[in-house]
Amino acid sequence: MLVHVLLVEDDLDLATTIIDYLELEGITCDHAANGVAGLALLSNHHFDVMILDVNMPRMDGLTVCKKMREQGNSTAILMLTARDTLDDKLAGFAAGSDDYLVKPFEMQELIARIQVLANRRSGQTNRLSLFGLDADFGAKTLKRQQRTLQLSPTGWKILEVLMRKSPEVVSKKQLLQAVWGNEQPDSDSLKVHLFKLRQQVDTSNESKLIHTVAGQGFVFRA
């Protein structure tokens, strides 16, 4: 499972250490040095987990977390802080964080928590059933009503992103990032794969499940 992390941390030495360690573990990591920059990155890219420092300039981590949840963003959030009191932890959870790690911490623990959150975000659930479409992403089996569908490897990746984010709209940039990472193809490739995926999933006598939202992106819904 390819995990893409956003690190929002103003301590550049710590950020560099974390990024280098995540890369050794095969985890892709983007970095923002403050909350405002973090929200900007989040609006244009797909991330599985956000590592969010509490004390930052311009916008603190609790405010970033609250704004994300108010906007309906469900990205898993791991908060980093030097504060270890129960009240501080409760404030983080109340703002919408999913987990809490007190500085200083061991990198191996950070990796373990990221993996848990990434799996939880996907539900660690290989099977999803939405609007009459039954998908098993582990076994790579797909059925709609009584029809068994066959998808390409890229088709599976696109469908998984859309189904897991449903009913949220996934922007073109987010979809490209989630499926291809930093080695993205030309824009026509995405169009071709979406066309083939729709041919398989949406037949003429069934309701459409994969929709284009003009100016926003793509969504999986009835």
Image (spheres, rainbow, N blue to C red):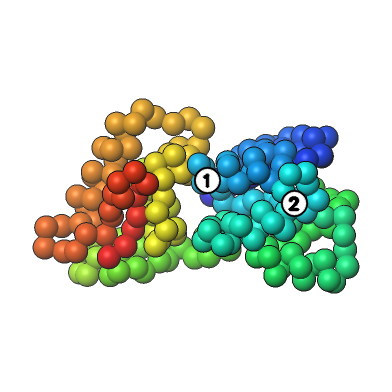
Q: Is residue 109 visible?
A: no
Task: Judge left or right: residue 139 versus residue 121.
Answer: left
Q: Nearer the viewer, residue 21 or 72?
A: 72
Q: Residue at x 40, y 61 (%)?
A: 166
Q: Residue furthest left?
A: 205
Quadrant occupied by the C terminus: bottom left
Image position of 147 with respect to 115: above or below: below
The mark nearer the N terminus, 2 or 1, is 1
State the residue in front, 117 or 167.
167
| Horizontal side of residue 31 vs 3, given as left or right | right
Task: Give the label on residue 219, or none.
Answer: none
Q: Which percent across, then down, holds residue 125? A: 49, 65
Residue on which disc 2 sits: 60
Q: How many marks?
A: 2
At 37% from the left and 46% from the top, the residue drawn is 216
For residue 17, which quarter of the picture?
top right
Residue 46 position, x and y percent, is 51, 46
Q: Amino acid at mark 2?
A: Asp
Residue 157 percent location from the top left of the image: 40, 48
Residue sitting at x 88%, y 68%: 85
Is 55 placed above or below 173 here? below
Q: Mark 2: few, some, or many residues within 10 Å (few <14, many ≥20)?
A: some
Q: Which mark is residue 43?
A: 1
